[in-house]
Image (spheres, rainbow, N blue to C red):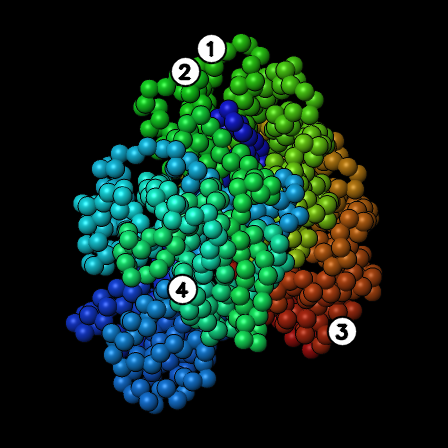
Amino acid sequence: MAAKKSQKNFGSAFSIGASNTIVPSTHQRMAQNYLLVWVDGNIDQTNKDCQNTLTQLRAAVNDVMMFNQSDECIQFLNQMNDEQAFVITSGALGKNLVPEIHDMPKLDAIYIFCGNVSYHQQWTENWKKIKGVHNNIKDSCDALKEGVKKVNQDLIPIIFVAMNEAASTENLNRLEPNYMYTQMFKDIFLEMEHDYNQATKILAIYCYKFYPDNTDELNVINEFKRDYRPEQAIWWYTRECFTYQMLNRALRTLDADTIINMGFFIRDLHQQLHQLHEQQLPSYHGKPFIVYRGQGLLKTDFEKLKKTKGGLMSFDNFLSTSTKKDVSLQFAKGALKNTDMVGILFIMTIDPRVSSTPFASIKEVSYHKIEEEILFPMHTVFRIGAIKQMNNNDQLYQVELQLTADDDEQLQRLTEFISKGAEGKTGWNRLGMLLVKTGYFDKAEELHNALLEQPSSESEKATYYNNLGYVKDAQGDYGKAIKYYVKALGIEESTLPENHPLLATSYNNIGETYRQMGDYSKSVLFHEKALEIREKTLPANHLDLATSCNNIGTMYHSMGEYLKALSFYEKALRIREKTLSENHPDLAISYNNIGGVYVERAEYSKALSFFDKTREIIEKTLPANHPDLATSYNNIGGVYRQMGEYSKAVSFHEKALGIEEKTLPENHPDLAISYNNIGELYNQMGNYSKALSFYEKALGIREQILPDNHSDLATSYNNIGTVYHNMGAYSKALSFYEKALGIKELTLSENHSSLAIFYNNIGSVYNKIGEYSKALSFYEKALGIKELTLPENHSSLATSYNNIGLVYKNMGEYLKALSFQEKALGIEELSLPENHPSLAIFNNNIGSVYNKIGEYSKALSFYEKALRIKEKTLPANHPSLGTSYNNIGSIYYNMKEYSKALSYFERALDIRKVSLPPNHPDLEDVKQSIAIIKEEL
């Protein structure tokens, strides 16, 4: 089932989608934008020479990965995420390694460290990314440091806003999320005060873990902790030590932990720049002047630049420029050896009368006092002018930029749009809201608990408790979420009038959490209270009404009342489409939920259409590893799984799991959802051992965090039962199915659609073990519920008709069997694509009945239809293919065509040997069939 999205109200300022967002990565992170891979068959970390070499390499690049073999290096580079890599390799390994890795976009440069320089220089001339061949480690490190400088220039993120894009809020919603969020962080830090003694200690402790083996950098961190003063901020930034490295990476990757810990440093840099600007301004006499910046730009970004000519561009970091054209041009030319990049010389016209941009010459306060450097603050905005090729080289361009004027209408619109994203009464409160919006819940919880320790009003306390409830809900800790929401509600009920909108917010949030806990009666109660207040106090198109409609829809969705759910979801969507921009996250929530209903109704093309709309919005508005994107990938994967397109399903589910394993705690409920989805996929593909492994991972998480009668536990028990069923372990299957049914019967109404699934599964086991009257009883219970709750052509009805037909076949009532199975096939042919795996099942079953009544040619026709579909959609060793080969073999046996029969039985045996346990009854059956035929031959 697709993951539904409810909404919680966060604080008093805004509402955002609540489900499936959580903490940043807990894996070891890097301090820099790049790493070094050292490949040499002679690396031995116990050797003193090797240790000395490693120390020198770490002085240039902190993170060094070491490999003795080329294939290990290649595998590592292929698995890298967003880092850039340098490779230093021995000559012996390099000759074969370089052709394998040279064209990887993540690889910036290669250095050869060898004994015979002249020999290796000959073959390296053909490879552009090889930047040096050395027999001295100092020379290699010096070259590497130059490469690092170039990468630091090139990796500053740039945002482009075309002329037409800033004309409306809809277009501004397409801005890169990281740019907007780092701007919000900066604006918040600029208005916050800090205890420097405490802040430097906290930053130092935080930084130690990034440099555990780098003694030189640890000494620099200790120096910073001891000596740092706000008036030294630029000196520390230009020193290009941990301050420069970590801040640049954090701003590029939106690492909120690092940004927050360095918040005081960001503030000091801006304030010192502002002070220098004020001091230097009279010396310009109001006359414009030119500065330069040279760097490489990825070809994809260069295309964006060309399309944005006349529009705006901004550097998402502090911007270093030079008054020396030749120095900057060398940086631009450094990109010429990289086929993925274009060298750019930016020629920037600066009008000192633009008061909103406090640039300054930092020569006197820089760590490097010989450089003629002009430093600009974060997010300085320029207008793009002429773009000209240089020296007839299609890889080298000069681009004219002009510092944007204070009264530029497009710039004002951009600034206003971003400033609305993090509203709040205080800097700390705004920071808490921004942390939630960007998915950093651990940090948000820490901050709000600290705020509760400070003197605050009752209304502020209610906001903090409400926000903590939101955080605990997002972390899957529903009990604590309720506790915090109730605290907020208690304050509000004692201080606010009875129909105040903030009461509706709290009722809404409590109702949503009870829904997630499976307590639907309490959920209904609180959601109806929220809706009643909002209908009385708000205009018809108010967004809070959309939130209530959405959440009531989600509740009906959970209860299996899909048409009611769709009605409320569509009400919410109508309000949002009238009032929100086209890429607003709330629209993504509505599209997602409507898609989920269409999944339940087996309308897969409609579901996919809505899920794709959701994904497009999330990819445009949230960071790349945001958990909501994982939810979106999971939902799309689920639809492809239902449609039988397994390779697409695997791709999307693995994308989702990749994000979640990086960003969620190991027992988070969303991980259980992903493990469950992948288990279901492997089950459908016939890989039962893998399916069982993923289902058991999901169950392990759910048993730890959910109450004993939670609906998701029933799902896990049912899924594990299904695998045992498919493996022929029927007693185990029955045990798990009965556990699942026990939970569902306690928590659902007697005609809830979910009960039909469990009755159906238990009936199927009884059918397998020959207890046909029990099987028929459970199947008919399932059919009765489905006929009450589903449209007449729903594919789930086809499943029930098919199952009842199977029982009648086993009881020898073949005409009844044929009637039910033809009903089933008729429904599925109307709703499914022609090669859907379900059609193979129904064709197979009808063939089986014709086989029983001796109409072998008709049986063979249906069996062959089933086989053609399976051969197109299933892996070569899928057990279901074994079933088809076995069935066709039985027809040929009945027709006395024994050689053809033997051929098909042997194919069935080959598959069953590799796909089924050795004691599976289907394996024994086919062996007996082969033995019987051999006697006939």
In whole angstroms, how far apart are the C-alphas of marks 4 and 2?
58 Å
Q: Position of residue 37 (x, y in %)?
A: 35, 69
Q: Name the residue: 62% across, 54% down.
A: 310
* Residue depicted at 51% across the width and 73% down the height: 339
Q: What residue is pinned by disc 2?
A: 458
User: SS for tag 3?
Assistant: loop
Q: Rate crowding at label 2 as few (under 14), some (14 to 19) or many (20 or more) other CA atoms within 10 Å.
A: some
In the image, residue 508 above or below residue 733? above
In the rendered image, residue 415, in percent from the top left (x then y), is placed at 53, 39
For marks 3 and 4, give the one nearer the viewer: 4
Mark drawn on residue 495: 1
Residue at numbered disc 3: 897
Q: Of residues 3 and 788, which is closer to you in this image?
A: 3
Question: Which is more N-terminal, label 1 or label 4?
Answer: 4
**Kind of residue sitting beneath label 3:** Glu
Q: Residue reaching furthest front?
A: 285
Residue 349 visible in this rendered orientation of the protein: yes
Local crowd at mark 1 within 10 Å, few (<14), some, or many (≥20)?
few
How crowded pointer 4 is (Cα within 10 Å; few <14, some 14-19, many 20+) is rated as some
Q: Element at badge 1?
A: helix
Dot 1 and dot 2 residues touching (CB under 8 Å): yes
The residue pinned by badge 4 equals 324
| Mark nearer the N terminus (3 vs 1) | 1
